[in-house]
Image: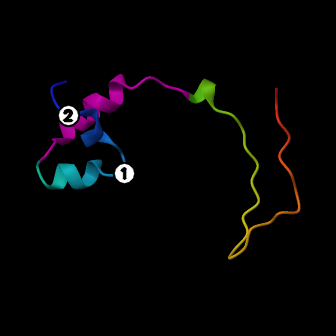
Amino acid sequence: MDKPERLFDVRIARRNIAAGVITQDEFDAFLAQVEDSAANAVRCDAKMVRGAVDDSSTIADED
């Protein structure tokens, strides 16, 4: 691939396709060659607090 990988970032790929920077075929080919990293995923539980930081819990080091 001769175009920078950043052009294929899924957050901006549709805009780049619409602007003619990359084609749909180039984007599809890029997605086909991306390695599946699902096995490297780690589950993370998070508590979302609106407008404040919840300091009631601490994070333990996992050494």
Q: Is disc 2 surrounded by few (<14), some (14 to 19) or many (20+) residues within 10 Å? A: some
Which residue is denoted by mark 2 in the rendering?
A: 26
Q: Residue at x 73, y 44 (%)?
A: 44
Using the image as rendered, state which of residue 48 and residue 33 is in the foreground.
Answer: 48
Q: Quadrant of the N terminus?
A: top left
Q: Is residue 36 magenta?
A: yes
Using the image as rendered, state which of residue 50 and residue 19 is in the foreground.
Answer: 50
Residue type at numbered disc 1: Arg
Residue 61 falls in image quadrant: top right
Q: Earlier in the sequence, mark 1 or mark 2?
A: 1
Which residue is denoted by mark 1 in the rendering?
A: 11
The correct choice, above or below, for 9 with respect to 34 in the image is below
Q: Is residue 38 magenta?
A: no
The correct choice, above or below, for 19 with respect to 50 in the image is above
Would residue 50 be found to the left or right of residue 23 on screen? right
User: Element type at marker 1?
Assistant: loop
Q: Is disc 1 surrounded by few (<14), some (14 to 19) or many (20+) residues within 10 Å? A: few
Would residue 40 be found to the left or right of residue 6 on screen? right
Would residue 20 be found to the left or right of residue 49 on screen? left
Q: Residue at x 68, y 76 (%)?
A: 51
Mark number for residue 35? none
Cα–Cα span, label 1 and label 2: 16 Å
Q: Which residues are magenta?
A: 21-37
- Give residue 41's position: percent from left, percent from top: 63, 32
Q: Residue at x 11, y 49 (%)?
A: 20
- Give residue 63's position: percent from left, percent from top: 82, 26
- In the picture as drawn, the residue positioned furthest to the left comes out as 20
